[in-house]
Amino acid sequence: MVILACADASQAWTRRWDNINYSWVDVAIAVTDMLAAATAEGLGSCWVAAFDPVRRRLQLPPHLYPVALVTLGYPPTPLIHEDKPRKPQTELFEYRG
Ligand SMILES: Cc1cc2nc3c(=O)[nH]c(=O)nc-3n(C[C@H](O)[C@H](O)[C@H](O)COP(=O)(O)O)c2cc1C
């Protein structure tokens, strides 16, 4: 299955002081939750940003902007994320007092 998650700026909050529309953030949060739920169900997933050809093919209305294309499927072997090398947290977070 492939899910194309789109932002609709007209439905999202816009921060007044710099006019930033949060529709992309909203979609990113929803997609992140979607991936976590898929993982909990034993599904494999991939967040794909290279979706221009799909946008053309689906002929999306102009008010919908595609943010993420999510592929979902059952992996041939169960996913064991702990085996993958990960950056240490010290490389990802910076604390300032
Ligand atoms: C914003 C974003 C866009 C991405 N776009 C692509 C993409 O176009 N093609 C692709 O193969 N992986 C893409 N990825 C990477 C995969 O979705 C995934 O994050 C990566 O394979 C690491 O997976 P893992 O955390 O399970 O190891 C993207 C990831 C993010 C966060």
Image: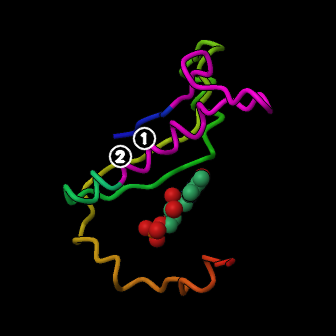
Quadrant of residue 65 within the rendered picture: top right
Q: Residues within 10 Å of mark 2 (few under 14, many from 20)?
A: some
19 over 79 or under it: above or below: above
Q: Which residue is mark 2?
A: 34
- At mark 2, the secondary structure is helix
Q: Position of residue 77 (x, y in %)?
A: 23, 71
**Structure colour scheme:** rainbow
- Residue located at (22% from left, 71% from top): 78
Q: Is mark 2 within 8 Å of ligand 1?
A: no
Residue situated furthest right in the rendering: 18
- Between the C-alphas of marks 2 and 1, the distance is 6 Å
Q: Residue furthest front?
A: 97
Residue 1 falls in which quadrant of the image? top left
Q: Is residue 19 above or below residue 85?
A: above
User: Observer-nearest residue: 57 or 25?
Assistant: 25
Query: Which range of residues does the magenta coloring cover?
Result: 6-35
The amino acid sitting under disc 1 is Ala
Amino acid under label 2?
Met
Mark 1 — residue?
A: 30
Total label count? 2
Q: What's the residue at 63%, 83% (across, down)?
A: 91
